[in-house]
Image (cartoon, grey):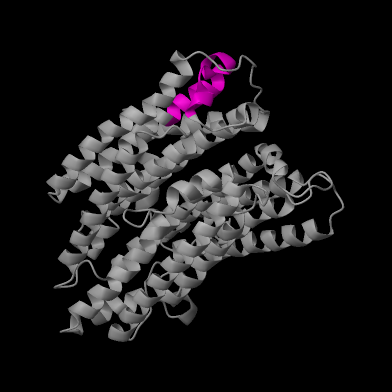
Amino acid sequence: MRPLSPLTLEIIVLITGLYLLLAESFSKAEKKEWIAQTGIFVLFWVFCFSFFTTGNPDPLPAEPFWHFYSADAFALFFKRIALLTTIIVLAMSIEYRGVLARFLPKGPEGAGLGEFYFLPVFTCAGLMFMASAVDFLFIFVALEMVTISFYVLVAYMRQNASSLEAGVKYLILGALSTGFLVYGITWIFGVTGETNLALIAQKLPALSGVEKPLLFGIMLVVVGLGFKIAAAPFQIWVPDVYQGAPTPVTAYLSVGSKAAGFIVLMRVLQPFVQAPGIGPKIVLLLAIVAGASLIYGNLAAMPQDNLKRMLAYSSIGHAGYLLVALASVHSSAALFGTAGEAVGFYLMGYLFMTLLSFVVMIVVANHSRGDDIVHFNGLSRRSPFLAFGMLIAMLSLAGLPFTAGFIGKFLVFAAAVQDRHFVLIAIGAITVGAGFYYYLRVVAAMYWQEPTDDTKIHVRPLTRIIIGALALAIVVFGVYPAPILNALKEGPRSTLQAARP
């Protein structure tokens, strides 16, 4: 089979999004689920094609266009995260259509739902571009493509005050974070005269006396990206937006946006972490943000009674664990070595366990009209299958052994031990204990509390397949993590060789 260029993946996704937009505009069908089903079908095949792609991992290839675009192993890995996340979010959207219809203007059946199904496809294309962006200009364009789609999706339930409030807050703070990012890019460009990250890395050793302007620019970029990855103290938008947005959008923000934000942060920091004079200061900045995220996210999640809000605060804590890995580097090579493997595996495991919890939450909310923890009381009697799926998700999020969440935390702490970040290790150990408390509250409600409603919950076949697959992936990769770790180590050239007969 002839290998594809990685750019082909984004082109197919963009064409699919445009086709669904036009088809929905001219379609007379009342039910719009076919839009999401078409998106799932195409994105699944794009995900399969991603294993038969090749590209140039050279940071400065001969063709000028590729100075903006990277096709290395990390880019392909994070593209697959974006594709898997979008596929599951589209399936969740089909399950969520009943809730969504209640908060849209009255009209024919399916009116207003079409845009909710094809906008995630455009978001997916932006996330894939972010995974490959190696130039500040391209990073900004891809980031805005993602952010603008989320502005619409967060506030999509136009007759729900919480959704509109979440949309306004996300719009204002998203614009503010973009301002920080652009201003930081301006400072870095003013000092180096370049926007390409590889060219910046080449010029840094020859620059002297510019540490303060560079540090100021990097700090602004970290602030801008800190909003995207929901790290403290830039997390003020997270609880209200996660709770008010439609649940599939909350899941998309929690997984897709965070993963893309971290690959961009890794690429941006790569030229600077080994630069003399500024590298240790950048590591210190990351360590401070990591510690603040761990403490605030996990402690604030403990008293929450709303499951979406609890997961919002816990996502801040998970951003802290990921930042611990990024803070455990002293050279640009190490950033995509041990620390990069820890970040990549953690994000893939976070995809499985977070999306699993949101899928179960949507099904339960459809039957109980709420997403508070009290609505999960006695779930094991109403639907043992859903209760078991949520049990696996909560145990993995807490970091119990033999789950993907445990392996992810182990890799993060291993990187921190290697770099002697003992303070962060101590904070992380304490916050893991806090995580056990609030995650196991959900387990206790499902298995030890009396149900508030005795009605049995029916689970659709597609939803059942997704829940089963996600739960299986959490356990399999918690016992045998090698496939994910090998995917992070393999470069595009080795992928090409494997594709050849």
User: How many discs mark residues in the rendered view?
Assistant: 0
In percent of the image, x 42 and y 22: which residue is there?
443
Q: Choose between 381 and 192: the one closer to the eye.
A: 381
Above or below residue 476? Residue 136 is below
349 with respect to 270 (left or right): right
Q: Choose between 235 and 273: the one closer to the eye.
A: 235
Above or below residue 150? Residue 371 is above
- The x, y position of residue 160, in whole percent, is 64, 47
Residue 56 can be seen, yes or no: no
- The x, y position of residue 456, in whole percent, is 64, 17
391 part of magenta stretch: yes
In percent of the image, x 33 and y 61: which residue is there?
266
* Quarter occupied by residue 413: top left
Residue 32 can be seen, yes or no: yes
Please state the extent of the stretch shown in magenta in the rendering: 373-393
Above or below residue 228? Residue 470 is above
* Quarter occupied by residue 190: bottom left
332 with respect to 29 (left or right): left
Q: Choose between 224 and 399: the one closer to the eye.
A: 224
- The x, y position of residue 83, in whole percent, is 55, 51
Q: Choose between 14 and 476: the one closer to the eye.
A: 14
Looking at the rendered image, the quarter that the N terminus falls into is: bottom right
371 part of magenta stretch: no
In percent of the image, x 64 and y 21: which residue is there?
457
66 with respect to 232 (left or right): right
- The x, y position of residue 389, in whole percent, is 50, 26
* Quarter occupied by residue 467: top right
